[in-house]
Amino acid sequence: MPRTRFSRRPTCRAVLTLIAAIVLLAAGTDPLGAASHPLRTQNVILVTVDGMRIQEMFGGMDGDVSKKEKYSGIDDLARARSRFWRPTPAERRLALMPFFWGKLVHQGIILGDKEKGSSVHPRNPLLFSAPGYAEILTGQYQPDVTTNDVKRYPHPTVLEYVHRELKLGKTQVATFGSWDGFKTLSSSQAGAFFTNGGYEKIPAAMATPRMAYLGELQDQIMALWESGRSDAVTFNLALEYLKKYRPRLLYIALGEPDDWAHARRYDRLLDYLHVLDDYLRTLWQTLEASEFYRGRTTLIITTDHGRGVRPDDWVEHDEGIAGSEDIWVAVIGPDTPDLGVLAPYPTVHQADIAATLARFFSLDYRKLNPEAGPPIPAAFGDPPPAPAE
Ligand SMILES: [Zn+2]
């Protein structure tokens, strides 16, 4: 914006401002494509839940998958059923995630309930982790992200963009991930803002006693696979960081649902999702108890990919496994209408999340990346786009 252009001509600037205001009032939007009313969001927390299917999100315990032990890997079906089986999908999801479905979702929206006519899809055809996270964080399918190798890519992310545009300090944007790769996927440049991933400890100079303790514990808790630490450590470190450093933008990247699914332990996957619900409850209650965050924080919760839908292939995902393309996104906060499940709704893409996140800070992400998907209108109470001709 050439701010100095009219600096010595106040009259001219005032007239132009007035004309601009009239034009904007008529259009109902500002040049960012943001709603005409100012947004209340000052902080955003992005949570990703690796490989969590729409089937569990919207329907809770899956009757087909859990039918045969051979396919489900359920060790004690009576226990699993008593915890999570109920007559209807709405009751099952409430049993699985009582806080999310009983309270949180009613303070915002969730998209992706395919049976009701709302789909969320990745643009990338690969349908595994790194391509999905790259798409979430950069707003587009990045064809050079073809493996889950931990490496840094040159594509700037929305986290970097918000950090730079709002001139935030190094601790005011942060990533916490259970897998090392979240650090490199979070930013095209090392050290731009605070990151902590894999079996990494918080630097001694920054660590609270609780952070130091969690750092010790992470080596003692045997995670299912060697590639990442327990989400309990990641989540609690992120929560402690939030209380201590009050980031404006926090990314919490959780990994365990994918692990339990690959291990073909449907019972433990359900147990985990119940724990996840408790993470969300704790996070939300912490925000609500904080003067800094209460009423001015938006939560965006999503997943990198879906998985197979059949009893034999629900453990897998990737290109060619039907169901891997079905994902979901929830947006909860003061600027999002309290609608819960929003369906039917035009298809939304994983690539739309970056611009949605940026818009909560009144930033236009597509200035950085013109290829990025648009903000999700419903997240701001705007009408859906007209269907393409
Ligand atoms: Zn996986």
Image: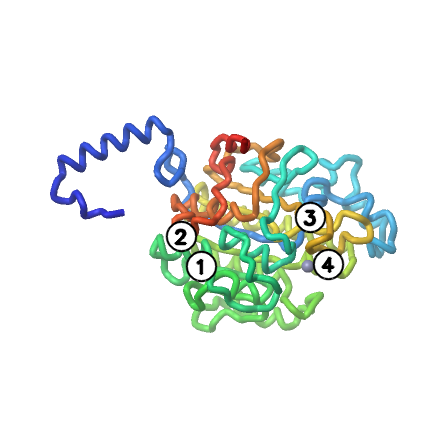
Crowd class of label 4 (few under 14; some 14 to 19; many from 20; radius 10 Å): many
- Sequence-wise, which precedes: disc 2 or disc 4? 4
In this figure, which residue is indicated by the disc labeled 3?
A: 53
Disc 1 + disc 2, Cβ < 8 Å = yes
Separation (CA) of disc 4 from disc 1: 32 Å
Separation (CA) of disc 3 from disc 1: 28 Å
- Sequence-wise, which precedes: disc 4 or disc 3? 3
> Which residue is depicted at the point 61% across and 51% down?
303
> Which residue is depicted at the point 64% across and 64% down?
230
Separation (CA) of disc 1 from disc 2: 8 Å
Front-most of 331 and 157? 157
Mark number displayed over residue 156: 1
Quarter residue 294 falls in: top left
Front-most of 269 and 294? 269
Crowd class of label 3 (few under 14; some 14 to 19; many from 20; radius 10 Å): many
Q: Amino acid at mark 3?
A: Arg
Q: Indicate which quadrant contains ligand 1.
A: bottom right
Separation (CA) of disc 4 from disc 3: 13 Å
> Which residue is depicted at the point 78% across and 53% down?
313
Residue 317 as seen in the image, left or right of residue 81: left
| SS at badge 1 | loop
Residue 227 as seen in the image, left or right of residue 296: right
Q: Position of residue 56 (x, y in %)?
A: 71, 45
Separation (CA) of disc 2 from disc 4: 37 Å
In this figure, which residue is indicated by the disc labeled 4?
A: 260
In this figure, which residue is indicated by the disc labeled 2?
A: 368
Pointer 2 residue Cβ closer than 8 Å to ligand 1 = no
- Sequence-wise, which precedes: disc 2 or disc 3? 3
Disc 4 + disc 1, Cβ < 8 Å = no
Crowd class of label 2 (few under 14; some 14 to 19; many from 20; radius 10 Å): some
